[in-house]
Image (cartoon, rainbow, N blue to C red):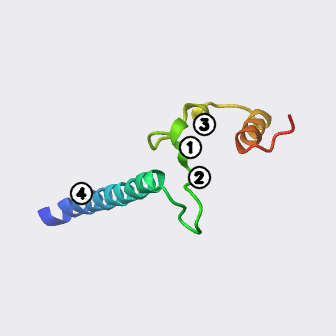
């Protein structure tokens, strides 16, 4: 009877371990893409060099966590994407 009680905990820990490993692999790939000197495709240079000046760790920025109206969120998104009519 005890093994049936413990089984969900083992399964849950397995899911947590797999999720952590996938995140670790993703972060390794993200860091290696930031550090590369050449482009992933083609013969150009890495376009993430400027991005590295502003983003040094993998996390959600604070402005993304703020509750705001749709109009404000839309305007901010357009500004961040460089398509806002200035």
Q: How many marks?
A: 4
At x 46% / y 39%, what residue is drawn? 56
**Disc 2 crowd, CA 10 A, few/some/many (<14, 14-19, 20+):** some
On the question of residue 75 being in view, the answer is yes
Residue denoted by label 4: 9
Label 1 close to label 2 by CB (< 8 Å): yes
At x 74% / y 33%, what residue is drawn? 69
Residue denoted by label 2: 47
Q: Looking at the rendered structure, which numbered label has been put on residue 64?
A: 3
**Where is residue 8, by image quadrant?**
bottom left
Alpha carbon separation for disc pair 2 and 4: 44 Å
At x 78% / y 36%, what residue is drawn? 75
Nearer the observer, 13 or 80: 80
Q: Looking at the rendered structure, which numbered label has been put on residue 80?
A: none
**Disc 4 crowd, CA 10 A, few/some/many (<14, 14-19, 20+):** few
Circle 3 or circle 2, nearest the eye: 2
**Disc 3 crowd, CA 10 A, few/some/many (<14, 14-19, 20+):** few
Label 1 close to label 4 by CB (< 8 Å): no
């Amino acid at each position: 009877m005890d093994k049936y009680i413990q089984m969900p905990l083992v399964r849950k820990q397995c899911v947590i371990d797999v999720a952590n490993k996938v995140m670790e692999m993703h972060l390794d790939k993200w860091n290696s893409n930031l550090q590369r000197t050449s482009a992933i495709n083609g013969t150009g240079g890495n376009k993430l060099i400027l991005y590295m000046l502003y983003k040094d760790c993998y996390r959600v920025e604070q402005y993304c966590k703020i509750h705001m109206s749709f109009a404000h969120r839309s305007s901010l998104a357009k500004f961040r994407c460089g398509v806002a009519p200035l």
